[in-house]
Amino acid sequence: MTTVLHCHKGIGPAVRGTALCASDDFSARYDLDRMKGVFSRPAHKLYGQDYRGQILVLNTAKGGVASAWMLRHMRESGVTPLAYVFNSVNPILAQGAAFGEITMVDRFEDGDVTTLIRSGDELLVEPEAGRITILSRGP
């Protein structure tokens, strides 16, 4: 059985992949080892987990101008998640996603996306339509 979640119209192409989810906030600058492709801040709930090719589902984005160019650098180096899904995102990170050509959506009508989606869920993220479809539930 599929579940459809509705959000604000997002950025980037539609993507399909596996969710990596936590209720934590997100900083490209302080939470990630952008060379190894893992969460590197010990206090983060996803510490040590590989984010490459995953759809990251997190509470909110934090960070300033440096985060925008970091997302672009991640894309250029090939060490990037497949997409970002947030409850809310700041304009600077949204600009960074556009500049980095990375899919991003936020502002869900259905509630807290970090409780609606679980790590391991198979997702279809469609930014232009403002929706995520949970195709199957993970373990």
Image: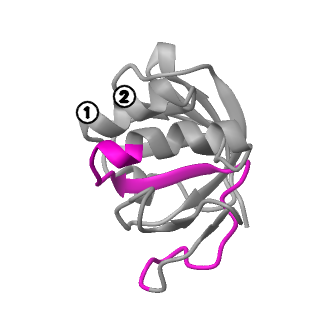
- Checking the image for residue 112, the label placed there is none
Q: Residue furthest bottom?
A: 42
Q: Residues within 10 Å of mark 2 (few under 14, many from 20)?
A: some
Whether residue 44 is in magenta: the answer is: yes
- The residue nearer to you, when weighing 117 against 23, is 23
Secondary structure of the residue carrying tag 1 is helix
Picture layout, residue 78 above or below residue 130: below
Q: Is residue 88 visible?
A: no
- Give the image's coloring scheme: one colour
Picture layout, residue 135 above or below residue 44: above
Residue at 73% across, 48% down: 53
Residue at 58% across, 42% down: 73
- Quadrant housing residue 58: bottom left
- Quadrant housing residue 82: top right
Residue at 69% across, 59% down: 120
- The residue nearer to you, when weighing 120 against 15, is 15
Secondary structure of the residue carrying tag 2 is helix
The amino acid on which the numbered mark 2 sits, given as a three-letter code, is: Gln
Residue bearing the label numbered 1: 91
- Residue 98 is left or right of residue 13, and the answer is left
Residue bearing the label numbered 2: 95
Magenta highlight: main SS = loop
Q: Is residue 41 visible?
A: yes
Q: Are marks 1 and 2 in contact (CB under 8 Å)?
A: yes
Q: Residues within 10 Å of mark 1 (few under 14, many from 20)?
A: few
The amino acid on which the numbered mark 1 sits, given as a three-letter code, is: Pro
- The residue nearer to you, when weighing 56 against 119, is 56
Percent from the top left, x then y, of residue 127?
50, 22
Picture layout, residue 115 above or below residue 9: below
Magenta span of residues: 43-67
Percent from the top left, x then y, of residue 121?
67, 53
Whether residue 49 is in magenta: the answer is: yes
